[in-house]
Amino acid sequence: MLGFLLRLLPFWVREPLLIVVGSVFGVRIMYLAVRDQELVPAGIGAAFLVFTAVRVHEVVRAWRARRSPGPAASANGAAITADVPAGTAADAPARMAADVPARMAADAPARSGAEPPRGPAAPRKDHNAWGQAVAAVALFGAVGAALWVVPRVMPSDVSAPHAIPCPPAEPEELSKVYKKTPRPVTGQELCKTLNRPGVAKLLGTPAGETATSVSATNNTAPLTGGRVAQPEAEVRFGTYTVNVAATYNDLSTAQYVKLMKYGTEQNIKTLTVLGRPAVFSSDHTMQFRISAGSGGTGGPVEQGPLARTLTVALDHKDRGGYCDITVWSESGALPDDSVLLAVAGKILPKIPERADR
């Protein structure tokens, strides 16, 4: 039905309308694809832009054809052609003799000073002012409708789960351990990787749910005397809280799994993620409460809700160091392990692999 209505429109109304709509949708979809790093929207946006480029080419070609002059006309209104009938050499004198009276008749008005007779002038078509006005109103109305529909069809930045920006980098320089660590990631970089709409969708947060708080730190691992870099980022939603930490120590994932046997971790499962050794584990978080008017003092540390962690080595050879991706919720509900694997697929490519030391 829409295609039939578009075919009813004049060419100079239909084509600009298609160009405007294709440009708006194509640029918008490509922007979302680049921001979310998704291939399918990128292909759709590219298709819109290619369609728009084809329409622009058609309009340019029609405009050039409209502006190019037609075949030249003779003095008496007849079109001059370059076709000459072929003949033999013997017929040449006869044709020249026959052309003499015709040439003399054609030159007679010029010698006498009279103007040659002209044929009837072609009627000049007046532009339809009402039609142009209606076409202009329809065109601007279509553009306005496209601008109104696009933000409602495509998710806007205002309603995106990363409405709260990541904190800026700390003004002071990183500690010396970060300078000694080959290619370390910073907490701000982890935050930007984690605080994206694609990650929120993978977690299964309700549509329109935004991050309530974000944080990023460039600390060192505890109990190491400041000798191990451990950048960390955390994004808290109403449904889930996600924490990502990269630990640049010499502990391999295989050694880390052995230590889990002496800890409180449960539901341990080893696997391979993006070609790297990895392990799933579960453990309870810790929580403490600060009472109002208590001068900043609170009660004892209590056991918090259960958290699920995916630990992945920082390089394929498992030469030491790992990345922890932890998810938990206040209600105690946890997403499926496949969700953590999907989140890891978004985050790990942004963390440089650990180089040889």
Image: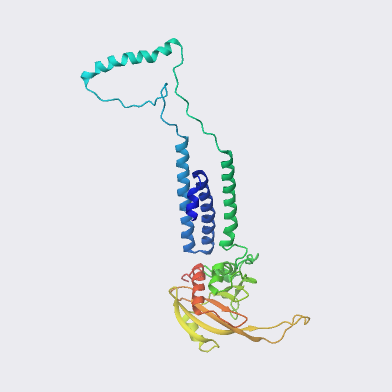
**Residue 237: x %, y % from top left:** 62, 74
Query: Looking at this rendering, what residue extends furthest in the bottom direction?
Result: 262
Residue appearing at x 47%, y 53% in the figure: 3
Decide if residue 104 is on the left or right side of residue 240. Answer: left
Taking the image as drawn, is residue 321 in sight? no
**Residue 356: x %, y % from top left:** 46, 71
Q: Observer-nearest residue: 254 or 87?
A: 87
Taking the image as drawn, is residue 77 in sight? yes
**Residue 203: x %, y % from top left:** 55, 74
Residue appearing at x 28%, y 14% in the figure: 97
Query: Looking at this rendering, what residue extends furthest in the top direction?
Result: 112
Residue appearing at x 51%, y 50% in the figure: 18
**Residue 278: x %, y % from top left:** 47, 78
Q: Observer-nearest residue: 252 or 187?
A: 187
Q: Is residue 326 above or below residue 96?
A: below
> Image quarter for residue 300?
bottom right
Q: Observer-nearest residue: 222 or 32?
A: 32
Number of marks in picture: 0
Q: Observer-nearest residue: 314 or 222?
A: 314
Q: Is residue 134 above or below residue 46?
A: above
Decide if residue 95 is on the left or right side of residue 301. Answer: left
Q: How is the image coloured?
A: rainbow
Q: Is residue 86 above or below residue 310?
A: above
Q: Is residue 25 above or below residue 201?
A: above
